[in-house]
Amino acid sequence: MRVQELKLIVIGLILISCMSCVTMGNIFSDDDVKKIKPGMLEEEVIAILKAEPNSRSEYPNGTYLLQWMYSYGTPVSGDGRHIAILFGPERRVIKITHQFKTGPEPLIK
C-alpha cells in the first residue's frame, strides 16, 4: 500500500469518528445549574434541568439524592457532566452535593 493511500484511509477514519458523536443522558448547561438554589422544589429543579433524574437514592432520615448525568463524544474522546442534589423530606433542595464536568459543553442543545 502506498503512503498516499494510507493517508486517505486515516483521514477517512478520522472523519467517520468525528461524525459519530454520541450523547447519552440528559444535557444540562452550567447556566442551568447556577439557577438551582436551596429551598427549590424537586419539580422546579426537574424543569430547570429539562429532564427527570438518572438516579435516586433514599436515606433513612427522609432525605434523598437525585443525580443527573450525561456523556458525549466520539470513539476517540469524550466528555460529560454530573450533578447530585440532596433534597429534604419536604421535597426541597438542601444543597448540591457534587458537580463534575470534563470538557466544554456540547453543541447539541
Image (cartoon, rainbow, N blue to C red):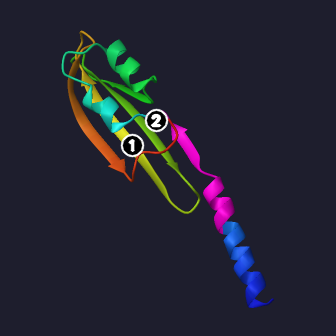
| Residue lying at 18% horizontally and 21% vertically, measured from the top left | 38
Residue extending furthest top? 90
Residue 96: image x %, image y %? Answer: 23, 31
Is the residue 43 above or below the residue 22 in the image? Answer: above
Give the residues drawn in magenta, as a range.
14-27
Q: Find disc 2 in the rendering and name its residue.
A: 27
Which circle marks residue 81 in the picture? 1
How many callouts does the rendering have?
Answer: 2
Q: Amino acid at mark 2?
A: Ile
Residue 95: image x %, image y %? Answer: 20, 27
Q: Amino acid at mark 1?
A: Arg
Q: Are marks 1 and 2 in contact (CB under 8 Å)?
A: yes
From the viewer's perspective, tell me whether residue 32 is left or right of residue 108: left
The secondary structure type at the circle numbered 2 is loop
From the viewer's perspective, tell me whether residue 30 is left or right of residue 95: right
Residue 85: image x %, image y %? Answer: 28, 28
